[in-house]
Image (cartoon, rainbow, N blue to C red):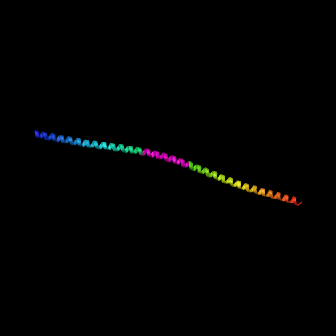
Amino acid sequence: MIMNFNLKLLKSTLCILSILIVSFAHAETIELLQKNASVAYEKMMEAKQAAESSTKDVTFAEKKLASAKQKMIEAEREAEAAKRKSEQARIAMEHATNRWKQASDALANEWGKSEVK
């Protein structure tokens, strides 16, 4: 009977030890899973911050590009206006030169006539 009791006690002890070992292994697994989840969360937050920063950089670059395009459009308009003004000035100069030549020729003719008399 004592041997039967010892055998039952040994079986019970082995059963309890098995449960403890399984529980400990399960606890280690949960702890490892928690640690992995924590590391993954930190990496996710870093990636989120990097993505937000990159989005801000893109927005800034797009605004800068739009501003540069607007300045280029304005510069092109100014260049076209300057070309028109330059062309008008060239035409005005040609007209003034022609009027001066005509006036000079008329003056020369009058001087020529007065010298002949």
Nearer-the-camera pick, 62 or 102: 102
| Quarter residue 115 falls in | bottom right
Left or right? Give the position of 49 relative to 113: left
Nearer-the-camera pick, 2 or 83: 83
Q: Quadrant of the C terminus?
A: bottom right
- The residue most toward the left is 1
Left or right? Give the position of 75 relative to 29: right
The residue at the point 23 percent across, 42 percent down is: 21
Left or right? Give the position of 91 relative to 50: right
Membership of 108 in magenta stretch: no
Magenta stretch prevailing secondary structure: helix
Residue 27: x percent and y percent? 28, 41
Left or right? Give the position of 52 relative to 23: right
Stretch of the chain drawn in magenta: 47-66
27 relative to 78, above or below: above
The residue at the point 56 percent across, 49 percent down is: 68
Nearer-the-camera pick, 47 or 16: 47
Nearer-the-camera pick, 22 or 70: 70
22 relative to 100, above or below: above
Q: Quadrant of the N terminus?
A: top left
The residue at the point 19 percent across, 42 percent down is: 15
